Image (cartoon, rainbow, N blue to C red):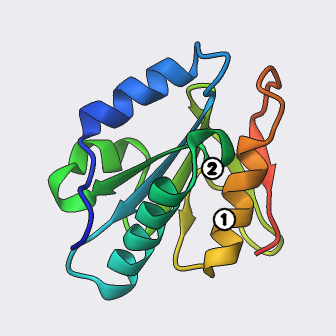
């Protein structure tokens, strides 16, 4: 593993800050499991994003090992990995996708450009906007 996962305390603090921050309302949480290659690949991809891009362009990205943070995973209903939760102003966004039930979690592997496009879109939303859901087409 070529990155350092975050602690649940780091994520909880960032989510609390996002509910009040005029500058950083967007937090992204990537949940992974170290023993599953697709999950580990996605975590490494999100590490690449947080290393190569600023929080202003992709949000504040946190990478959480499910096995070591079961309470946080349970809070968001994470039962499979990789899973991604997008938080806007302290609350998980409801993800709407054609042909899928609405959920607060995106489960599975996507292409790098799909993830990056989604993160950039949310990070570019007007900071004062109240947003409860995100419609995506992947």
Residue 101 visible in the shown view: no
Residue appearing at x 26%, y 31% in the figure = 9
User: x%, y% of residue 73?
Assistant: 33, 50
Relative vertical location of residue 96 with respect to residue 127 in this rendering, above or below: below
Please give left or right for residue 17 compared with residue 128 in the image: left
Is residue 59 in view? Answer: yes
Tell me, for residue 58, which label it has, or none: 2
Q: Is residue 78 above or below residue 13?
A: below
Q: Is residue 4 left or right of residue 73?
A: left
Residue 39 in picture, x, y percent from top left: 37, 77
State the residue in front, 135 or 22: 22
Q: Is residue 96 above or below residue 16?
A: below
Q: Is residue 18 above or below residue 101?
A: above
The residue lying toward the viewer, choosing from 90 and 96, is 90
Q: Which mark is residue 116?
A: 1
Describe the element under mark 2 as helix, strand or loop.
helix
Asked whether disc 1 touches disc 2, contact meaning CB atoms under 8 Å apart, the reply is: yes
């Amino acid at each position: 593993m070529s990155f350092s996962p975050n602690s649940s305390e780091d994520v909880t603090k960032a989510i609390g800050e996002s509910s009040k921050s005029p500058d950083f309302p967007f937090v992204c949480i990537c949940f992974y499991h170290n023993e599953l290659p697709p999950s580990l690949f996605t975590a490494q991809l999100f590490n690449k994003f947080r290393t190569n891009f600023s929080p202003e362009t992709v949000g504040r990205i946190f990478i959480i090992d499910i096995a070591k943070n079961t309470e946080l995973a349970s809070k968001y209903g994470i039962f499979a990995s990789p899973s991604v939760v997008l938080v806007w102003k302290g609350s998980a966004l409801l993800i709407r996708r054609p042909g899928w039930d609405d959920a607060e979690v995106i489960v599975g592997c996507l292409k790098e450009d799909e993830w990056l496009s989604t993160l950039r879109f949310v990070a570019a939303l007007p900071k004062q906007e109240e947003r409860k859901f995100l419609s995506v087409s992947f």
